[in-house]
Amino acid sequence: QVQLVETGGGLVQAGGSLRLSCAASGRTSNFYTMGWFRQAPGKEREFVAVIWWSAGNIYYADSVKGRFTISRDNARNMVYLQMNSLKPEDTAVYYCAAHPSYTYSKNTYLYDYWGQGTQVTVSS
């Protein structure tokens, strides 16, 4: 089992920044890729970014490229999402997820474990 806990969400004005954290515990050695996804009200959950635990390979959704930065701290089993230049359309519940292989997959159903999510609200 792997447990994922996201923190760091909140309310911010457009143009502001937030840093989300995802703490992973349990059998983290079984997972090689960590992803961030988000879900806005009335919309499907969508891909934001992924990072590989070991090599650090990274891939972003076009909508966040250049504004968001994903990173990890292997020693602490932490994954981060630094979000800058936030826009109202970034408002969503943000989730981290774990995948059992190296992948750049955007498909939510391929990720085995999910956190409970953290709300990000960007006001205009």
Image (cartoon, rainbow, N blue to C red):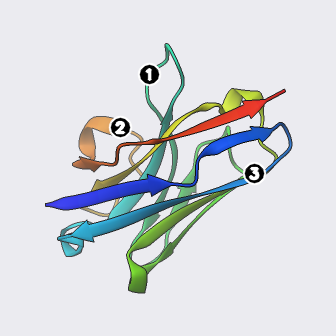
**Could you say whether the residue bearing mark 1 is in a helix, strand or loop?**
loop
Asked if residue 113 can be seen in this view, the reply is: yes
Q: Position of residue 119 (x, y in %)?
A: 54, 38
Q: Quadrant of residue 92?
A: top right
Q: Position of residue 120 (x, y in %)?
A: 61, 38
- Label 2 to label 3: alpha-carbon separation: 22 Å
Q: Which residue is mark 1?
A: 44
Q: Which mark is residue 70?
A: none
User: Which residue type does callout 3 highlight?
Assistant: Arg
With 56 as the anchor, is 70 left or right in this view?
right
Q: Residue at x 42, y 41 (%)?
A: 106
Q: Position of residue 20 (x, y in %)?
A: 57, 56
Q: Quadrant of the C terminus?
A: top right
**Could you say whether the residue bearing mark 2 is in a helix, strand or loop?**
loop
Nearest to the observer: residue 114 or residue 29: 114
User: Which residue type does callout 1 highlight?
Assistant: Glu
Q: Report if the CB atoms under discs 2 and 1 are less than 8 Å apart.
A: no
Q: Residue at x 38, y 47 (%)?
A: 105
User: Which residue type does callout 2 highlight?
Assistant: Asn
- Label 2 to label 1: alpha-carbon separation: 11 Å
- Label 1 to label 3: alpha-carbon separation: 22 Å
Q: Quadrant of residue 45?
A: top left
Q: Which residue is mark 3?
A: 67
Q: Quadrant of residue 1?
A: bottom left
**Could you say whether the residue bearing mark 3 is in a helix, strand or loop?**
loop
- In this view, the mark in front (2 or 1): 1
Q: Tell me which numbered mark, 1 or 3, is placed earlier along the sequence.
A: 1
With 58 as the anchor, is 107 left or right in this view?
left
Q: Which residue is mark 2?
A: 107
With 8 as the anchor, is 96 left or right in this view?
left
